[in-house]
Amino acid sequence: MVLSGKVAIVTGASRGIGRAIAISLAEKGAGVVVNYTSRAGAAAEVVETIRNAGGTAMVFQADVAKSAEAIALVKAAGAKFNRVDILVNNAGIIRDNLIVRMKEEDWDAVLDVNLKGAYNCIRAVARRMLKNHYGRIINISSVVGLVGNISQVNYCAAKAGLIGLTKAMAKELGSRNITVNAVAPGFITTEMSAALPEEVKERMLGQVPLKRFGSPEDVAGLVSFLASDAAGYITGQTIAVDGGMVCV
Ligand code: NAP
């Protein structure tokens, strides 16, 4: 299997896209740390699914927005598996509103989880990867980080920030064989996107050339590829998984 012997941390892996990524990486042979923040039962189910399929996984609760918890997450992974090769910064939240109504706490919360969370986890794992001369870091951004979206100034800023962070990290870590890439999903069917009003979903579907919304597995396929040795010469890139919705 292409990821045999590798160890991956997937943040926000209790459901949605993170869940599919964790299962996909485990199917390819990686030992996986399933991180979550509040839904312990859902995270335990992901671990059970992986183990039932013959894979290896552990669960770890941590709020990635908190530096000490991100450090504890990486430490727990190292203690269990003795190495960390792959970090997928997937944890994310939305707090949508028009700018005139957006509360400062909603700006802060979205930036803290989506952008600072990635910084916290990368900082916690970087020394280990530098020492090992190996690493795969994959940041889950969004197409709205490329093109913007009404009522999502906080989320778009965080997701665009992740793209800048990806480019800077790719340059900084490349000499030690650590690749850093961003994945920009379009509309993917999960709890996060389910909250959108029906008319907005219809309008968005009209903008998708492939005429369907994406599944978490559509995103997981690309992430697993970027985590593999086959993607060893790809770094600093942002790749959309959006059915052709955004072509930039
Ligand atoms: P989701 O279904 O809402 O799941 C979010 C996940 O993040 C959950 O596992 C949640 O854990 C975890 N999480 C939230 N805050 C966290 C924190 N502070 N620390 C650790 N984990 C935390 O979201 P999704 O749709 O799968 O989205 C996954 C990623 O893809 C996000 O970064 C999102 O912005 C991005 N994305 C999604 C779409 C889409 O259409 N769905 C499109 C573009 C980009 P709990 O279960 O414990 O709460």
Image: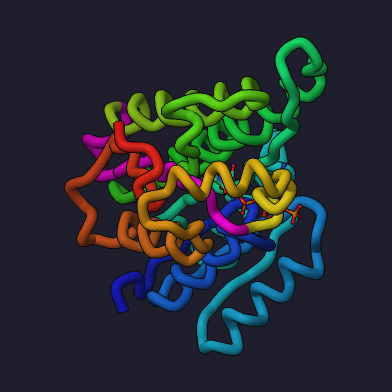
Residue 61 within the segment the image draws in magenta: no
What residue sits 62% from the left and 29% below the top? 155
The image position of residue 153, as x and y in percent, is: 62, 20
* In the rendered image, the vertical position of residue 97 relative to residue 30, given as above or below: above
Q: Is residue 162 left or right of residue 233?
A: right
Q: Quadrant of residue 45?
A: bottom right
The image position of residue 205, as x and y in percent, is: 51, 50
* In the rendered image, the vertical position of residue 151 relative to residue 125, given as above or below: above
Is residue 83 visible to the viewer in this orientation of the structure?
no
Task: Give the residues drawn in magenta, as a range.
Answer: 172-189
Is residue 247 visible to the viewer in this orientation of the structure?
yes
What residue sits 46% from the left and 56% below the top? 84
Q: Nearer the viewer, residue 125 or 92?
A: 92
Colour approach in the figure: rainbow
The image position of residue 239, as x and y in percent, is: 33, 43
The image position of residue 62, as x and y in percent, is: 73, 49
Q: Nearer the viewer, residue 89 or 242?
A: 242
Q: Is residue 226 left or right of residue 213?
A: left
